[in-house]
Image (spheres, coloured by chain):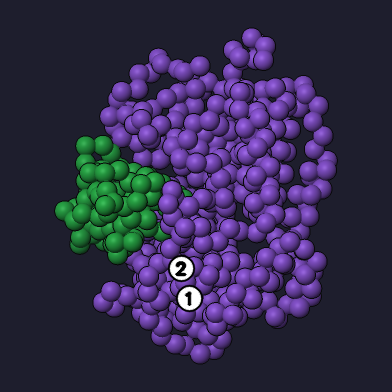
Chain colours: A green, B purple
Amino acid sequence: MNPCFYWIDRPVSFRPGETIAAALLRAGIADLGPEGGAVRGRVFCGIGACQACVVAVAGEGAVEACLTPARSGMRLAPPPSLGLRHE
Amino acid sequence: MSELAMTELPILVVGGGPAGVAAAVTLAEAGLRVLLIEQRDRLGGAIHRQPAPGAPQVWRGPARHRRNWTELTSRLERAAARIELRTSSVFLGIDGAGRFLFEDRRAGRVFARRVRAAIVAVGAVERIRPFEGWELPGVTSAGGAQVLLKETGRPPEGPIVVAGTGPLLLAVAAQLARAGNPPLAVLERGNPWRRPKTLAGLATAGPQLTEAAAYATTLAWKRVPYRTASEVLGVSEVGQGLAIRVRLGKIERLLQARHLLVHDGLEPNRAGIPLPAPGAEIPVLLAGDGREILGADAAILDGRRAAAAVLASLGQAAPVAPLEAALGKARAFQRDLAEALRSPSTLPTPETMICRCEGRRYADFTALPADASAREIRLMGRFGLGACQGRFCGPMLAELRGEALPSASPPRWPLRPVSLAALANFSMDQTET
């Protein structure tokens, strides 16, 4: 059985060596939130440039999903600050 | 290797694609120490991205690219004693003491190095001409989708539309078709048939033409329509999919798809990059598509050219004239290609997102004073101020203003997200040697 990580509370299985982005997309998760945010995250450029797929890793920091190999048990969520207005 | 060579500072090469690897190999073969930094876990760049372990290889790429890469990697192995390779590591910036800072993402650790010179070969970013809804989930850059396809060996599920301009549209569409999910349509904004003279000039470029013909054959075989003078006007979400309003020649249509892949050419990836400056204490050189968009073949030559310039500055003779001549040919090809596909510029609608990071629309841009400076555009308009540092809205605004938006000076470092814990654990007096 493939290992898995968690997107918010949902388990997402991945193949070892695969990026977080590849696993999320295969699971049909294209909308990377945050819910109700003005602009939602999504995998876009695939090369770590656009920062649109940045996800928060619980206990670590924020990483580009398209560059970061998935690891078993990671807990991922939309980064809290993105998509919020500064006014 | 002499003891001196072991203790002297290395030449830094950032980016392990064709340009960076060519530069690293050239320097190492000339006897210099090299520190090669690559953000991914393997070398190759976007062009030579390999399938993840266990994933099928759906498409192996043109034979000449494979040959070039095999040659570079075998030279890299032979010169391995002089090349320190750090994968899964990102360049963060330069500190006040002139040290180059990196994060080793695998170890979650920031490290600093002193270097003699730096060659930055971080490739290209895609240009996107904005339309309503380009920021939505389900819209991906064509290059990004191509990288994912190479890695996973699987195309995205559900109907796909590919749109924008440039030869990459053909390549991605053909690769998707071969992988088992031919796009509904490829929409090319340009109208190359209108410029037969330029097309005839392009036809003299051997390898690129063979490659394009192979893609066109695949598309014809899989019955994928390739429409010129056609573009996306806007996209909105409908249930699980996208409603894509398109213009096919003079006719407007609505297409339903799950994925929209967009691409309008390439830009050198320059955001936050220390730029070459005359008389700098630590010389910085750009190489490959990150210096000038000339393509994968030329990137190898350009990496060698940058390495030769470093060698020349250290008093080692390194002829560059043959490289310059070949780069000139690549430049002429790119110019003809751009001319063949040139299309009239169009203004976005007021609701069109320009800066995705900060959620700023075209109406927010037009609300700024007409004579707003680049600084005012950034600070009042918040354009180019977001997480991507203007890599996407920068070229959009440059086209709309008819004038480039100067990059933030000094650059905004760290260049990439880095955890506060990793930064806090980095003690300012630790420099690896």
Q: Position of residue B296 (x, y in %)?
A: 65, 52
Q: Secondary structure at mark 2?
A: strand
Q: Position of residue A44 (x, y in %)?
A: 41, 59
Q: Which residue is mark 1?
A: B183
Chain letter of the residue beneath label 2 in the structure image: B
Same chain, marks 1 and 2?
Answer: yes
B221 is higher (above) or lower (below) than B150: below
Q: Residue furthest left?
A: A9
B120 is higher (above) or lower (below) than B60: above
> Nearest the camera: B340 or A28?
A28
Q: Position of residue A26 (x, y in %)?
A: 33, 61
Q: Which residue is mark 2?
A: B261
Q: Residue furthest top?
A: B3
Q: If you read the primary sequence from the N terminus, does the residue marked by circle 1 or circle 2 appear first?
A: 1
User: Is the residue marked by circle 2 packed among few (<14), some (14-19), or many (20+) residues within 10 Å?
Assistant: many
> Can I make out residue B295 in this image?
yes
State the residue at coordinates (57%, 50%).
Answer: B48
Query: Taking B196 as reference, is B238 left or right?
Result: left
B237 is higher (above) or lower (below) than B19: below
State the residue at coordinates (41%, 85%).
Answer: B254
**The disc labelled 2 sits on which kind of residue?**
Leu
> Nearest the camera: B409 or B42?
B42
Query: Taking B361 as reference, is A37 left or right?
Result: left
**The disc labelled 1 sits on which kind of residue?**
Pro
Disc 1 and disc 2 in contact, CB within 8 angstroms: yes
> Nearest the camera: B342 or B324?
B324
State the residue at coordinates (44%, 55%).
Answer: B55
State the residue at coordinates (35%, 47%).
Answer: A16
Query: Taking B138 as reference, is A1 left or right?
Result: left
